[in-house]
Image (cartoon, grey):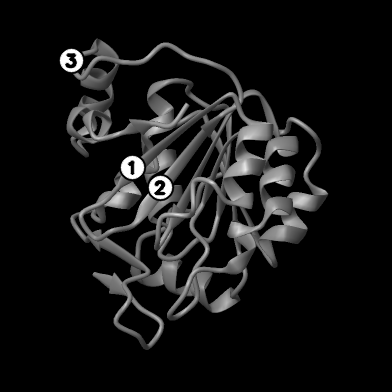
Amino acid sequence: RVMTFDSVFEQSKIDRRRPHLPVHEYSRAMLLPVAFAQPAHATVLGLGGGVMASALLHLLPECQVHAVELRPRVLEVAREYFSLPHSTNLIMTIGDARDALGKAPDGSSDLILADMYNSDRMSPAQAQRQFIRQSSRVLGGSGWLAINYHRTPDINGPLFHQLRAEFAVLMLFKSKTNNTVIFASKRPFEALRTKDPTLVELENRLPIDWRRLMGRVIRLN
């Protein structure tokens, strides 16, 4: 099942038999930070069909997920057609993600996943330096940020300049559809080998081919 906003761009895609399992490769890649630090609180900016929220709730049953979506109708569709679960661990906010971030307390989240798109383009908000600053403030000392971009940002541009100023480690994943996921970690960490037991365990809990995805991540610093 596919969600679109009257365009050729697929906002969300699920297997109706396993709605918690992301189909798009970039959506799967956005979950990779869980291999390094399992969050107690995750923030999802841009609900779409609820694929990321559903995956986190399935993968991390104790994690509290706060999802922010601009359009009320998108939430209704996610509930009705994309099996977004009714869970006490899922908090929904209808509104602008920038406002939600601005109101969030310092260090209140461990993981931020940003995938904000309208019918035909990415929200410019997630390419702004202020968005990076606010995300860094909201994340705890071991927090992670993952952002989905339709094109790879200029690694020498102002966005990456701000990312380098706020985060200890930056990584990149490029999907087969040319989406680019940027990962940013607040503190250094040890790299995982593709045969690491952590990835095997995660694959048993959510089969998205963790080892193959991790093998394609490029470290930028």
Residues at circles 3 and 1 in contact by the CB criterion of under 8 Å? no
Q: How far apart are marks 3 and 2 (CA)?
A: 22 Å
State left or right for residue 46 relative to residue 130: left
Q: How far apart are marks 2 and 1 (CA)?
A: 5 Å
Residues at circles 2 and 1 in contact by the CB criterion of under 8 Å? yes
Return the residue at label 1. 173
Q: Where is residue 145 in the image (x, y as percent from the top left)?
A: 55, 38
Return the residue at label 3. 195
Between 19 and 88, which is closer to the camera in this rendering? 19
State left or right for residue 214 relative to residue 117: left
Which mark is nearer the camera, 3 or 1?
1
Q: What residue type is labelled 1?
A: Phe
Q: In this view, does 63 lie above or below 35?
A: below
- Tally of marks: 3
Q: Which amino acid does label 2 sit on?
A: Val
Q: Residue 181, which numbered label? A: 2
Q: Where is residue 110 in the image (x, y as percent from the top left)?
A: 60, 30
Numbered disc 2: secondary structure: strand
Residue 66 shows in the view: no
Q: What residue type is labelled 3?
A: Lys
Q: How far apart are marks 3 and 1 (CA)?
A: 19 Å
Which mark is nearer the camera, 3 or 2?
2
Q: Position of residue 131 (x, y in %)?
A: 69, 52
Disc on the earlier residue, 3 or 1: 1
Residue 142 shows in the view: yes
